[in-house]
Amino acid sequence: MFFHLRNKFFYICRIKTIGYKIMNRKLKLALAALLGFSAACSTVKNAPSKGSGDPEAMTDTTRIDHPFMVMYGVRIPDAPIISKPLNPVLQQDSTVQVPESQPQPAEK
Amino acid sequence: MGSGCKLGLRKRWALDLFSNLYKETVAEHRLNTLFWECTLRCNLACRHCGSDCRVAPGVPDMPLADFLKVLDEQITPHVDPYKVFIIFSGGEVLVREDLEEAGREVTRRGYPWGMVTNGMALTPQRFERLMQAGLRSISVSLDGFEQEHNYLRGNPSSCERAMQAIRLIVQEPALAYDVITCATGALIPHLEPFRDRLIAEGVEHWRIFSIFPMGRARDDASLRLNDEQFRTLLDFIRRTRREKSIDVSYACEGFLGGYEAEVRDHFYQCAAGISVASIRVDGAISGCTSIRGNFHQGNIYRDDFWEVWENRFGPFRNREWARQGECAGCKMFRYCLGGGMHLHDDNGQLLYCHYHKL
């Protein structure tokens, strides 16, 4: 009985701790929005936080949410990305022979 | 310091919040952008090339199979491919005849991909093949009107070729794109007509960089903006964004003080080694491809990429080492963390500070 209550107590504390952390992050984002800088904080808003669970299962249309553009990078598409290669060309077998062992750098 | 340095209280509070939130992003360091520097060959020899690329750079292209092996065995087991954007970079990626094959292989594995190009070799046929291979995003370089662009690129037909490439990409609804411009002092007086020219060509997204002293640009001070030109550029971007005539932004580099969140969609951050990694042409594993070539954390021909990403990117994720020189006593360090990784020399000294230019 004691151990059952103890374990239950620790479980509740852990749930509250995780909840506090999540709420704390949400509170910070809400404050940023109140200040008018929700968009400016969007790169961290979309970043997953610890304990958020497994990533969503891959579906036929999956959106990528990381709008931050690196200097010599490219814009991230706005439209949902179709994860399955529907183009018939992509259905063909690969023609690239991937080495089985550690590859060696090409000779100059 | 100029007026651009002044941070209002509201923005300062927001920056403090962002900095706090960003620490979680750093702790998580979830990879979402992977550069593959697939070649250092180039069909141009631009004056401002930070990678010193040329027709025959003396470094062979990385075989596609080698990159795919790392992808399959060392990266894919740890990520959701559709959440990692692969960017083919160079050099000029279109010089690789197997670029479409690379795109198909990456797409087959579930990764979205994009590329940066000078447009010289982007014919309608090549563009169609790249779209068929799964191209999702592209950036085309155009550094001004014909005189400015061709001077920087060292080729009299480079501007026209870049324009032709732009006319192709703006018509493709399934493609994310932008035009990227390296602004020199020569362009500053012509920013508004150049903007209008881009709008007339149907360009909706535009990014403007300033040239940093690396590679061939290292010793050419004429390529860099002086303080007044830099402020003029930021004022132009801020004004144009308010007008909403075109989606224009300054590049990701540099903490911009009072211009923060007004010339970009986000607060300043250097994502190198936080969410961005690179596999360079010789196999070196690093953060962003803008970082100097001798600063790397491992090599795919010797190390496991994921082990390197998890355990050897300390300098990217804890930037206290950058608190030296002009950064040592700077109150803005808590926002900028010493600036972009690419702006430090071999001794960790900052090459220049955007904030102090304001």
Image (cartoon, coloured by chain):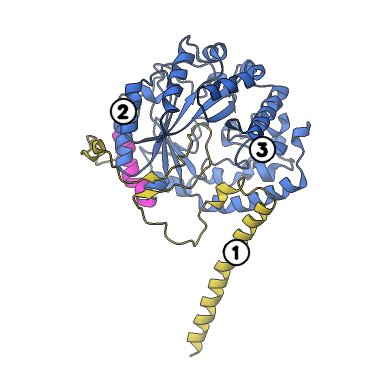
**Residues shaded magenta:** B65-78
Could you tell me if the residues under marks 2 and 3 are in contact, i.e. CB atoms within 8 Å?
no
Q: Secondary structure at mark 2?
A: helix
Q: Of helix, strand and loop, which mostly describes the magenta segment?
A: helix
Q: How far apart are the alpha carbons under marks 2 and 3? A: 38 Å
Residue on which the image places disc 3? B262
Chain at tag 2:
B
Residue at position x 47%, y 11% in the image: B155
Q: Secondary structure at mark 1?
A: helix
Discs 1, 2: same chain? no
Coordinates of residue B104 in the picture (x, y in percent): 30, 36
Q: Left or right? Give the position of B64 relative to B355.
A: left
- From the viewer's perspective, is residue B252 above or below residue B225? below
Residue on which the image places disc 2? B129
Coordinates of residue B93 in the picture (x, y in percent): 39, 26
| Residue closer to the observer: B74 or A56 | A56
Coordinates of residue B349 in the picture (x, y in percent): 64, 33
Q: Quadrant of residue B85?
A: top left
Chain assigned blue: B
Q: Is residue B197 magenta?
A: no
Tell which circle, 2 or 3, labels the residue nearer the N-terminal end. 2
- From the viewer's perspective, is residue A108 above or below residue B346? above
Chain at tag 3:
B
Q: Amino acid at mark 3?
A: Glu
Q: Quadrant of residue A12?
A: bottom right
| Residue closer to the observer: B133 or B67 | B133
